[in-house]
Structure formats: structure tokens, C-alpha cells
Image (cartoon, rainbow, N blue to C red):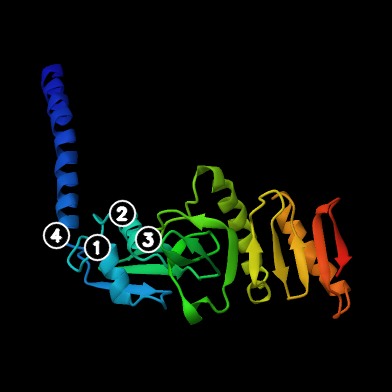
Amino acid sequence: MPQPIRKKKKRNVFYAPLSFIVVCAALVFGLSVFFRVSGIEVQGNSLYTAEEIVEASGIEEGDNLFFINRFSAVSRIHSKLPYVEKAVIDRSLPNKLVIVVSESKAIAYLSAEDGIWAIDRSCKLLGKVSGEELNGLIRIEGLTAIAPEAGQIVAPGESESPKVKYLASILTQMESLGMRGSVSYIDINGIVNPFFDYLGRFTVKLGTDEDLEYKFQLLLSAVEALNEGDRGTLDLSIDKRAHLTYD
């Protein structure tokens, strides 16, 4: 009796991994045959057409839903379409893909080696602008883009690179607080104390990039407490208070 039992165990040990391999192969074959992309939906786009976004992704109908490299597709979208700030690709079983994008908005412009370029709040270069396209955008002084390329962050040279991070923080605050239409320029020549025009009435000095969110809230509170005819320089760099020097 012991001998037949031992043979049965050996047979089970041999067939178990073989069965697992067969099942895996069947699954892979099933995935490769079925779940083909038959439709691609694009959401959140306004500056680019759905066709432009799909083409930039490199995904085509007939591609396998599970074998698509979504990371690579998103990277292609960002590199080819500079106004796309974020892209997410989701599967919608059994045979559909959904590409959800959020688009960058031009908030400012600066000089470059080959002209004037619009940038978004993260200092990403969006494209050349001129004439009426500059209306409503904040002029950036003290920063020049070297070898500009659409979709890339402003590169002003190694010694000037800290300005880019600070400027991005300033623009992000201005956009989140709805200040874009109230600021005509930002002068970032001196990174330790950049300044900007606000409401056509105040020159606002920021000091260093510490507590920037607090400084912008302080600015809004100070202006609200002032009279409509007040004008001057608001210095936010001293002892966490707003100091006004009247014109």
C-alpha cells in the first residue's frame, strides 16, 4: 500500500505547477484576444480637440486595453501638448478608454532668447505670444528664458534658477486668490525681495519666500482695511505685519 501512495504524490507535484502555467497562459491569451480598445473618450479639454489629445497619446483603436503603457501615453501627451497640465487615463471595461485632462492657463509672460513667451502658474512655457495675446497677462521682469521649449519649465541659467521656484509660488498664490487681473507686473530682479503692482495703487514688497501664503492673506486684509484712495508701498517683509508707506 505505501508504494502506490508515494507515486500519486509525485504525480501531483508534477502536475500542479503545470496546471498553473496552463491557466496563466490561457489568461494571457484571453487578454490578448479580447479587451481591444474600440472607443476613446476625452474629458476636460477645451484648448485641444479630442482628436489631438488621442493622437498625442499614441493609443489607437485595436490596442489591447491591459497592455497599454498608460505612463508613456501620459508622457507623450505632456510633451506634445504644452497646455495640458495633467492627464489621467482610465480603463472602462470591456473595451473603452477615458482620457481626463486638465489644461494649463496662461497667467504671465516673460522674455526669452527668441521672443515673448506665456507661462502658467508653475512657470511652464506654453508658447510665444504677442499683441493682444498679452492682454490680461502679468509681465515678469528680471527673468529671461534660455533656449525656450514649449512644455518645459523656464530655464534661466543655473545662477538664476532659484527665481523660478519663487516666481511659481507667487503665481500660484495669485491664481488661487483670484488676483490675476489686479497685478500688472512682478519684478523678481532681487530674489530676496521681489515686488509687484497691485490694483494700480500699491507696490507690494514680499521679502523672502518664507510664509508666502500668510503674506498674501496679510496683503488682502491690509488692503481691505485701507481707504479706496490710499496709495503707496506695502512692505510685507517686516515682523509679519503690513507696513504702508504712502506716496
Camera sees residue 94: no
Q: Quadrant of residue 181?
A: bottom right
- What is the x, y in percent for residue 237? 79, 53
Instruction: Indicate the secondary structure of the residue bearing disc 4.
Output: helix
In the image, what residue occupies the spot 30% across and 73% down? 52
Instruction: Report if the CB atoms under discs 1 and 2 are less than 8 Å apart.
Output: yes
Label 2 to label 4: alpha-carbon separation: 23 Å
Task: Name the N-terminal-most of marks 2 and 4.
Answer: 4
Looking at the rendered structure, the kind of residue marked 1 is: Gly
Cα distance in 3D space between marks 3 and 2 = 10 Å
Mark toward the viewer: 3 or 2: 3
Tag 3: amino acid:
His
- The residue identified by callout 1 is 58
Q: Could you say whether the residue bearing mark 1 is in a helix, strand or loop?
A: loop
Disc 4 versus disc 1: nearer the observer: 1
Residue neighbourhood size for the residue with mark 3, other residues' Cα within 10 Å, grouped as few (<14), some (14–19), many (≥20): many
Distance, label 3 to label 4, CA atoms, is: 30 Å
